[in-house]
C-alpha cells in the first residue's frame, strides 16, 4: 500500500534526524530524573494509603514525558516551514497523512525509548510495577503521544511562528499538568478541583497508570481512560490530517 510506504519513508527520514542529534533523548531524561531524585523523597509521608510512593509517583512522570514530548514538536515543524522543507512536499505525490504519521511515529519511538530508560533508572530507587499492568499502561502512553504529537505538529504548521505558538502551548501545558495529578494525586485536592480534573485527558491516563502498575488491570478507571483516549486520539489525528492537507495542498 502506497500510504504505508510513504509513512515508512517519512519515519526513516525523521529517525535519521534524531540519530544525528541523540542529545535530545539525554536532555529529555534530565527533568524526570531530577523529579525522581529530588522531589519523590518529599512524598514519603504525604501520600496516604500507599506502601510504595514511587508506584504512585512514577506513572505520573511517565505521562509528563509522553505529554510534553509530543506537545512541543510544533517548534520543529516551524523550523521546517521556515527552511522550505514543507514547501517542497507540495510538488510530491506523498500522502499528506503519511507526512503527519511518519513524524508522529518517530516521536512515539523516541518517547518510548525515553520511557523505557526512565523506568529502568527508577527500579533501583524502588519502583516495582506489575508487569502485566504496565504493558496495559503502555498503549495509553502511546495514545497520549499520538494525540499531543499530532496536535503539536498541526499547530506548528498552521501558525508558522514561534511567537504565535508559544502562548497556546504554554496555555495548554500548565493547566493540564496541574489538573492531571501527575505529581500529587488529585485525591489531595479540594472537590471543585477534582471535578475540573475530569475534563482533562491526562488525568484519566495518570489515574489508570497508577492502578495498572499496582496490578489492578480490571479497575473501572482503566476502562474510563481507554474510553476517553481512543475517541480523543482519533479526533485529533483526523483534525491534524486535515490541517496537513490544507496547508500542503
Image (cartoon, helix red, strand yellow):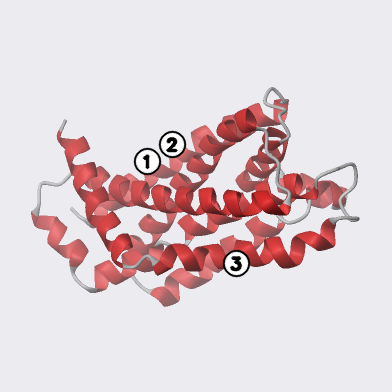
**Residue that carries the numbered disc 1 in the rendered image:** 238
Check the image and name the residue furthest to the bottom: 163
Would you say residue 180 is visible in this rendering? no
x, y (%) of residue 42? 83, 63
Residue 31's label in the rendered image is: 3
In primary-sequence order, the first of circles 3 and 1 is 3
Mark 2 or mark 3, whichever is nearer to me: 3
**Residue that carries the numbered disc 2 in the rendered image:** 234
* Classed neighbour count for the residue bearing mark 2: other residues with Cα under 10 Å, few (<14), some (14–19), many (≥20): some
Quadrant of residue 39 within the rendered picture: bottom right
| Secondary structure found at label 1 | helix
* Label 2 – label 1 distance at C-alpha: 6 Å
Q: Image height check: is 211 above or below 169?
A: above
Dots 2, 1 in contact, CB < 8 A: yes
Left or right, 15 with respect to 71, comes to left
Would you say residue 56 is visible in this rendering? yes
Mark 3 or mark 1, whichever is nearer to me: 3
Q: Residue at x 86, y 51 (%)?
A: 47
Check the image and name the residue furthest to the front: 124
* Label 3 – label 1 distance at C-alpha: 32 Å
Dots 2, 3 in contact, CB < 8 A: no
Q: Quadrant of the N terminus?
A: top left
User: Who is closer to the viewer here, 99 or 215?
Assistant: 215
* Classed neighbour count for the residue bearing mark 3: other residues with Cα under 10 Å, few (<14), some (14–19), many (≥20): few
| Secondary structure found at label 2 | helix
Q: Image height check: is 173 above or below 246?
A: below
In primary-sequence order, the first of circles 2 and 3 is 3
x, y (%) of residue 138? 54, 38
| Secondary structure found at label 3 | helix
How many marks can you see?
3
x, y (%) of residue 206? 67, 44
x, y (%) of residue 37? 71, 64
Amino acid at each position: 500500500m502506497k500510504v504505508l510506504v510513504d509513512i515508512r519513508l517519512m519515519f526513516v527520514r525523521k529517525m535519521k534526524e534524531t540519530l544525528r542529534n541523540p542529545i535530545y533523548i539525554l536532555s529529555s531524561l534530565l527533568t524526570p530524573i531530577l523529579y525522581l531524585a529530588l522531589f519523590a523523597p518529599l512524598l514519603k509521608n504525604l501520600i496516604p494509603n500507599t506502601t510504595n510512593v514511587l508506584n504512585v509517583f512514577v506513572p505520573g512522570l511517565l505521562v509528563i514525558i509522553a505529554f510534553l514530548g509530543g506537545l512541543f514538536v510544533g517548534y520543529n515543524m516551524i523550523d521546517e516551514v521556515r527552511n522550505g522543507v514543507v514547501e517542497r512536499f507540495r510538488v510530491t505525490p506523498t500522502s499528506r497523512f503519511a507526512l503527519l504519521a511518519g513524524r508522529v511515529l518517530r516521536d512515539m519511538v523516541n518517547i518510548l525509548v525515553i520511557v523505557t530508560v526512565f523506568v529502568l533508572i527508577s527500579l533501583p530507587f524502588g519502583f516495582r510495577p506489575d508487569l502485566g499492568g504496565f504493558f496495559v499502561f503502555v498503549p495509553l502512553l502511546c495514545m497520549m503521544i499520538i494525540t499531543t504529537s499530532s496536535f503539536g505538529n498541526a499547530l506548528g504548521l498552521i501558525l508558522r511562528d514561534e511567537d504565535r505558538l508559544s502562548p497556546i502551548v504554554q496555555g495548554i501545558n500548565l493547566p493540564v499538568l496541574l489538573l492531571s495529578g501527575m505529581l500529587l494525586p488529585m485525591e489531595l485536592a479540594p472537590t471543585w478541583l477534582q471535578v475540573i480534573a475530569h475534563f482533562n485527558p491526562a488525568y484519566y491516563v495518570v489515574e489508570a497508570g497508577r492502578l495498572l502498575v499496582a496490578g489492578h488491570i480490571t479497575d473501572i478507571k482503566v476502562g474510563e481512560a481507554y474510553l476517553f483516549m481512543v475517541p480523543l486520539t482519533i479526533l485529533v489525528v483526523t483534525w491534524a490530517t486535515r490541517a496537513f492537507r490544507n496547508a500542503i495542498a
